[in-house]
Image (cartoon, rainbow, N blue to C red):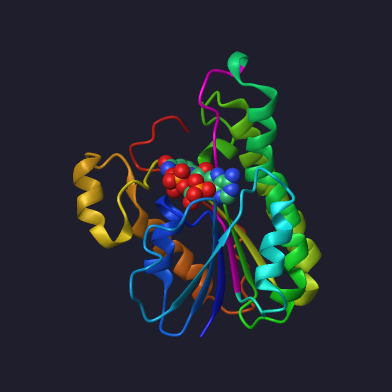
Amino acid sequence: MRNIVIVGASKGLGNSMIDGLGKKEDTFFLISRTKPMNLDLQADYKKIWIQADLSNLDSIETILQAIAKTPIDIVIYNAGIWEKTNFEEVTPTEIVSIINVNLTSVILLTQKLIGNIRSGRLKKIIFIGSTCGLENEGSDAIVYNATKFGIRGVTHALREYLRKDLISVSCISPGSIASDIPFSDGAETALKKHSNERMPVADIISIINVILDSSVATCIKEIHVPALKDTDL
Ligand SMILES: NC(=O)c1ccc[n+]([C@@H]2O[C@H](COP(=O)([O-])OP(=O)(O)OC[C@H]3O[C@@H](n4cnc5c(N)ncnc54)[C@H](OP(=O)(O)O)[C@@H]3O)[C@@H](O)[C@H]2O)c1
């Protein structure tokens, strides 16, 4: 029985985490702007959707009110957005929005949930970065890359801050994921659709399960997971 917060849970990797991680009697707090795809599907675990737009920092208050003083075992911050145009066309509003969703909300929400995590049992925080946050990746998405480098900085400093509480902080930096193919469709479907060029969500979820199953003595700092066919590293 675990209380799990997934930020960015309506679709893609975050939505697949619900089916991939869920165990009997878990409770998921699912944060996104739109309704999670599988919210109404019957399951052994409970799903609570908190509607919030993290590009607006005031939405953090909505999330905190919904979670209140519930002890939280696991926080997975997965929400991530990227620029849609080349650098010289990105608007100031879009820049602020990407930084708010990918980085500022990571810091703010984690800060505000520390009390809940301290009173939880498993004490795990996992951030989803990207290989775009690693040296020499080759992407020219300036704002996205800045936030994904930033989330690694948050990971390392937060681990120092929370060491005394035995709260572990990990960052998984994946490369190309077949996040358009849900966990429930199976890895083979994802491999077939993307000609083995994108990793099935199940592979990232297996890695998350390794972190969740490790004891309080273990500190998994960072995991870099490019797809084998990602040649830009
Ligand atoms: N896909 C890849 O190849 C890849 C590679 C490396 C790293 N990653 C990272 O993996 C994570 C998931 O990627 P994905 O491909 O699964 O992305 P996705 O399918 O676009 O899903 C992103 C999730 O974030 C939520 N989100 C976006 N903007 C939000 C906002 N303003 N407020 C609240 N929630 C918001 C979305 O929900 P709503 O739209 O409903 O708000 C959605 O649930 C991201 O951090 C991404 O950077 C992905």
The reply to whether residue 24 is visible in this rendering is: yes
Residue reaching furthest to the top: 88
Task: Indicate the position of residue 164 as horizontal and vertical percent values.
Answer: 80, 74
Q: Image point 70% across, 72% down: which residue?
A: 167
In the image, 5 versus 93, the foreground residue is 93
The vertical placement of 218 against 100, above or below, is below
Residue name at image x 39 percent, y 31 percent: 231
- Foreground residue among 56 and 80: 56
Residue 65 position, x and y percent, is 71, 68
Query: Is residue 85 located in the magenta-colored stretch of the structure?
Result: yes
> Is 16 on the left or on the right of 89, as rendered?
left
Q: Is residue 175 above or below residue 188?
A: above
Task: Give the camera-side residue of 231 and 26.
Answer: 26
Residue at 65% in and 43% down? 55
Q: Residue at x 71, y 66 (%)?
A: 64
Is 20 placed left or right of 110 in the picture?
left
Q: Which residues are magenta?
A: 74-87
* Magenta region includes residue 88: no
Percent x, y of residue 158 = 75, 59
In the rendered image, residue 77, in percent from the top left (x then y), is placed at: 59, 56
Res. 225 visible in picture:
no
Relative to the observer, which residue lies in front, 161 or 52? 52
| Picture mark count | 0
Position of 181 with respect to 138 (left or right) is left
**Main secondary-structure element of the magenta-colored stretch:** loop
